[in-house]
Amino acid sequence: MQISRIGEFGLIERIKKLTRTDSSVIKGIGDDCAVIRGSANKYLLFTCDMLIEGVDFRPKDRPYLIGRKSLAVSLSDIAACAGKPGHCLVSLGINKNTKLEKVDAIYKGMLDLARRYKVNIVGGDISRADKLTIDVSMLGEVEKKYLILRSGARPGDIVFVSGSLGGSIRGRHLSFEPRLKEARFLAENFKPSAMIDISDGLAQDLRQILKASGVGGVLYEELIPLARQARSLREALYMGEDFELLFTLSRSQANRLFMQGLKLFRPIGEITKAKSGLKLIDRENRIRFINSGGFRHF
Amino acid sequence: MQISRIGEFGLIERIKKLTRTDSSVIKGIGDDCAVIRGSANKYLLFTCDMLIEGVDFRPKDRPYLIGRKSLAVSLSDIAACAGKPGHCLVSLGINKNTKLEKVDAIYKGMLDLARRYKVNIVGGDISRADKLTIDVSMLGEVEKKYLILRSGARPGDIVFVSGSLGGSIRGRHLSFEPRLKEARFLAENFKPSAMIDISDGLAQDLRQILKASGVGGVLYEELIPLARQARSLREALYMGEDFELLFTLSRSQANRLFMQGLKLFRPIGEITKAKSGLKLIDRENRIRFINSGGFRHF
């Protein structure tokens, strides 16, 4: 049987079942970061993302932005756990005929973003590869009281998103700002019950929260903020690469956030009981089931 | 200018020069692991290795051994710093037509070795790729007093290796045992002044120690232990993938190690002043300069 039959998420589930971890691992496979026992009041966060030419960027994309994105996606994972990034390693698979200027530009993109978010690039590995491949692994930390996982959403919670969605693949995915500041603001001033960054699409990533939390959800079409580049609701639901925070707050906390008049955080739905699955209420108030689309590697 | 003009090590030097780190980084780019401030008496070790089909293994190699190697090479880096491994992430780039059984076998190889060395596989990333690509990033730790870097070798020190060399590419590179126990034995009972694991070949990796330490070195042909699979001295010097420990000890410590009669650790040369470079004394007592060969990605 080929892996495409069970798909990317089937494969992850399979690997998860095979894997045992000891008591120093607070959260292993299945969240934005692994969470590991650290000092008395902090956890270590540990995450990696592999970008491959032709999948995550095009050969013709600006090398500076390719490098920038390779770091930004891991920063976004740290943000989704409300953490602070610290150190990273860069594994680079590259063709030997690559121009030096291109490598310089890739690293410039990484280094500029690293400086901005006070991340140390502490090492890496270089290998020969046909297609440009960049895997960044990142260490961060989070105060125990601020850690946010995917698994805490409860029926009645309100679903929020940190910006507009859709059409990111037409450019924004290469230059998005990881929502580190916003995530810290939320963790320090509110108590999000669950959080994830939207990389595979609103529908699919909300499903990750629903599954991890054992709940259902409903989205309101009229509330979903479409990005300028988005051509349809479908793109907002399924296209992915938005790298916005998707999070849930209790109703009282949601009211408090709403009262602050921060336009960035938009309520887009609510959490329901598990058996109701994931639904969309469209502009005509009709209930639509959301299919299981979204970005998948296979 | 193409990167092949400056080569793998030229490229690493270039990246190193561009990179700034803060005071929490004890050792950044340029050793087997990055060394990061940890708890009061320990450092964090952080390392990654990217294996690519056709470069680090052949398409027909046993998937179990490919998975095993992907973890073993990072364990070997942790060993070279005299550390203990703790947690790792696995980024997997894989073709969608891959058989599920192959993926299972790859993970079985990783998980068996992880269990043996008490490493938690805490997460990862899966991407679509033409050629099987596995990047493992690993966290470990080491007591401050036991940390061994490449940079401490001094003239007069004796050069040792932890096993025999050469011919590893004909099979051993897929099934070698990372020298974690041996490295800890050395750190706890002796005080190696420098250490590295031999991945690119004895000559090239010894040069890394010489360069980091600002010293020269001499090897004695008759002392270099050839592996059963090695066909020539050249293979021991330049072939790489041996994953043995290469380390230096002061003369008095070397005598003490020698007196213990441990056959595993073999003295193969000594450290000299920087200006003498790296030389080989052959079986006829002639001085030969060792060329700069060894494994390079480009």
Image (tube, coloured by chain):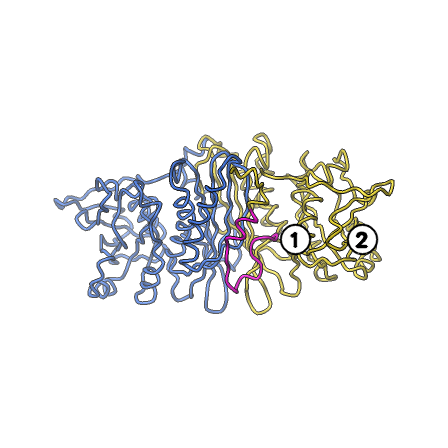
Chain colours: A blue, B yellow
Q: Secondary structure at mark 1?
A: helix
Residue corresponding to mark 1:
B80
- Which quadrant of the view contains residue B170? top right
- Earlier along the polypeptide chain: callout 2 or callout 1? 1
Q: Residue at x 71, y 57 (%)?
A: B153
Q: Nearer the viewer, residue A278 or A63?
A: A63
Above-or-below relation of B34 to B66? below
Asked if disc 2 and disc 1 are in contact, CB closer than 8 Å, the reply is: no
Near mark 1 (Cα within 10 A), the count class, few <14, some 14-19 or many ≥20, is many
Q: Nearer the viewer, residue B21 or B178?
A: B21
Q: Nearer the viewer, residue B59 or A30?
A: B59
Query: Which residues fall within the magenta stretch?
Result: B12-32
Report if residue B103 is visible in the image.
no
Chain of the residue that carries numbered disc 1 in the rendered image: B
Q: Position of residue A43 (x, y in %)?
A: 46, 62
Q: Amino acid at mark 1?
A: Ala
Residue corresponding to mark 2:
B262
Q: Nearer the viewer, residue B240 or B285?
A: B285
Q: Residue at x 39, y 58 (%)?
A: A81
Q: Is residue B159 magenta?
A: no
Q: Amino acid at mark 2?
A: Leu
Above-or-below relation of B265 to A130? below
Report if residue A254 is visible in the image.
yes
Q: Position of residue A9 (x, y in %)?
A: 40, 42
Between label 2 and label 1, give the one nearer the viewer.
Answer: 1
Q: Secondary structure at mark 2?
A: loop
Tell me: A218 left or right of A40.
left
Above-or-below relation of B144 to A218? below
- Which quadrant of the view contains residue A236? top left
What is the count of numbered marks?
2
Near mark 2 (Cα within 10 A), the count class, few <14, some 14-19 or many ≥20, is few
